[in-house]
């Protein structure tokens, strides 16, 4: 004789709702005579479990996240003061979020801190606006991605040699 538990009531209710959503009758899912679950029952249970776990994972990732980026800007092995450095967070469907901005100090050094409330892991990057090795009146914008494992900590870029073109460099001239 089978025992009855409150968990079975909850499980039966969830599976009944799930089976209705999937268009499968409860009789098709469990043989009432033998009590053996069919493959449809196992598939439905797995789908429900994956759905619940997906929402749980999203909740874990959601929240305020931060990153600190620091470094020293160089042009032809010389420190560059007063260069604009902007910290952004890349968005897939919207405009990128500006988290912080600063100009390098007299030694070419900078440190930026930014935070963003996102459902997924933030994707930070910096843009440096400079005139290293460009024609007069032009500016180059160099973009550097912050590694994902540096979210929640400090990314020390050490020395950033602007004469070496970054993969995402853009030249702006009047």
Image: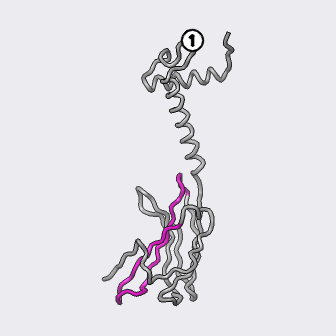
| Image quadrant occupied by the C terminus | bottom left
Tell me where residue 72 sits by quadrant: bottom right
Q: Is residue 107 above or below residue 53?
A: below
Q: Secondary structure at mark 1?
A: loop
| Image quadrant occupied by the N terminus | top right
Q: Residue at x 67, y 21 (%)?
A: 6
Residue lying at the far left of the rendered structure: 174
Q: Is residue 88 above or below residue 108?
A: above
Q: Residue at x 39, y 80 (%)?
A: 140
Q: Nearer the viewer, residue 46 or 128?
A: 46
Q: Is residue 144 magenta?
A: yes
Residue located beneath label 1 in the image? 34
* Residue 11 spot, x, y in % from top left: 59, 24
Q: Residue at x 45, y 72 (%)?
A: 143
- Span highlighted in magenta in the image: 117-146
* Residue 59 spot, x, y in % from top left: 58, 46
Q: Residue at x 54, y 65 (%)?
A: 147
Q: Is residue 70 above or below residue 120?
A: below
* Residue 119 spot, x, y in % from top left: 53, 52
* Residue 103 spot, x, y in % from top left: 52, 81
Number of dots carrying numbers: 1
Tell me where residue 105 sits by quadrant: bottom right
Q: Is residue 124 magenta?
A: yes
């Amino acid at each position: 004789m089978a025992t009855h538990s409150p968990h079975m009531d909850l499980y039966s209710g969830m599976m009944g709702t799930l089976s209705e959503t999937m268009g499968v009758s409860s009789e098709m899912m469990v043989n009432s005579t033998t009590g053996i679950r069919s493959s449809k029952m196992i598939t439905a249970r797995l789908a429900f479990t994956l759905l619940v776990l997906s929402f749980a994972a999203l909740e874990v990732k959601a929240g305020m996240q931060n990153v600190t980026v620091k470094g020293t800007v160089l042009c032809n092995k010389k420190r560059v003061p007063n260069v604009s450095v902007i910290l952004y967070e890349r968005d897939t469907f919207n405009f990128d979020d500006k988290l912080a901005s600063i100009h390098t100090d007299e030694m070419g050094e900078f440190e930026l801190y930014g935070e963003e409330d996102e459902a997924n892991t933030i994707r930070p990057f910096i843009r440096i606006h400079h005139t290293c090795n460009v024609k007069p009146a032009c500016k180059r914008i160099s973009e550097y991605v912050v590694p994902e494992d540096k979210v929640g900590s400090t990314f020390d870029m050490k020395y950033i040699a602007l004469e070496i073109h970054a993969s995402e460099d853009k030249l702006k001239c009047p």
